[in-house]
Image (cartoon, rainbow, N blue to C red):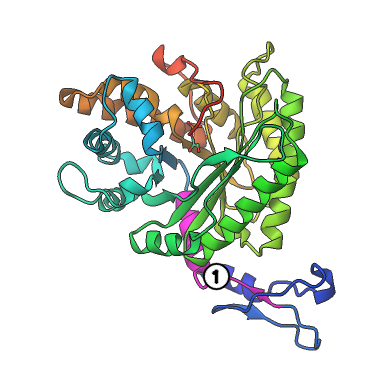
Amino acid sequence: MASASATLLKSSPIYDKSEWVKGQNLRQPSVSFVRCHPTSSSAFTVRASSYADELVKTAKTIASPGRGILAMDESNATCGKRLASIGLENTEANRQAYRTLLVSAPGLGEYISGAILFEETLYQSTTDGKKMVDVLVEQKIVPGIKVDKGLVPLPGSNNESWCQGLDGLSSRTAAYYQQGARFAKWRTVVSIPNGPSALAVKEAAWGLARYAVISQDSGLVPIVEPEILLDGEHGIDRTFEVAQKVWAEVFFYLAENNVMFEGILLKPSMVTPGAECKDKATPQQVADYTLKLLQRRIPPAVPGIMFLSGGQSEVEATLNLNAMNQSPNPWHISFSYARALQNTCLKTWGGRPENVKAAQDTLLVRAKANSLAQLGKYAGEGESEEAKKGMFVKGYVY
Ligand code: 13P
């Protein structure tokens, strides 16, 4: 598959320069696949990352049957909130203990193909002194890294936000690759109650596209995540309308930035009614709307679509994923959950060393349930009451 992709890139269709944005300077190729029109003097250059084959391979590995991503990249501030919910202080030692518990759950790699880490964890060792990254690789889990620097207010918008982190990103992504990361995540958000304004959508899409091409240049598969927040009273049709607009813009700028679609993964929100809408949607409705969105907006070249849970309960997120996998899709449709994988695990642990095994077992229960849902075989039986509790928090900050 890797070499097939190289062939594909080498023989990409050639566009005339006039099709490009007028007056734009084309970057010179760093290495590898460069294609010039053989007969035209106004040659158009298409370049791809020197990591093209590796990116395709990494993306395919993460998007492998019955597996998905464990998002454990909560910033130190967010991790602190999680720890506070079980009465623990937000110290490095407590974060290390919790993350050690997660990465070393026995057999986790059967259901989990990738784990997104916060920078601290990428460079951290477990409580037994092994590198977290090495423990993941032993489990056949690809290490990933959150590279965005979080959200700040977007001046000129309707109280919306934009995502920081492009300055110096290429040096950071190069260092993260050296440290063992093979994929990256950049989460930006779109708020429906606040608009969304055209400015906020454009800014989100452009930032994602710049991040994506920079990550590919360093050998990291970018997860493209424009989270459409659950906040709001709107119905499912409004979410669908906004999601169509957002994804159209995201793919426009991904293409403009020469991002190689075979080497990215997407992390969308499922299409649901707003959290405060009085009408609730069934898993079948969520699946119908979400699949229709994907079919209209996402090219089949993209290997994997790894949904976020966004405040749904653990069981709801699994049921919705299962409903989307009842018939074959052009892409691997899977999960990249944080709250919907970790909630009962964290509560079971409660910060007590004697509960580590039980907490790991609950993590494995959720990972297995979502693995089955990826295969369309989740029956939804025997779930705990805790796993059915919604986790929506208004104005949630990750
Ligand atoms: P949730 O599954 O809790 O929404 O988090 C996923 C994530 O990584 C957000 O960026």
Can residue 295 be seen here? The reply is: no
Q: Quadrant of residue 277?
A: top right
Question: Residue sitting at 65 percent across and 23 percent down?
Answer: 284
Task: Report the label total.
Answer: 1
Alpha-carbon neighbours of circle 1 within 10 Å: few (<14), some, or many (≥20)? many
Relative vertical location of residue 50 with respect to residue 309 in this rendering, above or below? below
Q: Quadrant of residue 201?
A: top right
Indicate the position of residue 89 as horizontal and vertical percent values: 26, 26
Question: Residue sitting at 45 percent across and 32 percent down?
Answer: 370
The reply, left or right, for residue 365 in relation to residue 166 is left
Q: Amino acid at mark 1?
A: Ser
Q: Quadrant of residue 237?
A: top right
| Magenta-colored stretch includes residue 57 | yes
Q: Hey, which residue is sitting farthest front in the picture?
A: 155
Indicate the position of residue 337 as horizontal and vertical percent values: 47, 34
Indicate the position of residue 173 as horizontal and vertical percent values: 45, 60
Residue closer to the observer: 196 or 279: 196
Residue closer to the observer: 178 or 38: 178
Indicate the position of residue 216 as horizontal and vertical percent values: 53, 62
Question: Residue sitting at 40 percent across and 41 percent down?
Answer: 73
Range drawn in magenta: 45-62
Instruction: Please give the residue where the numbered disc 1 appears in the rendered image.
Output: 49
Relative vertical location of residue 226 with respect to residue 263 in this rendering, above or below? above
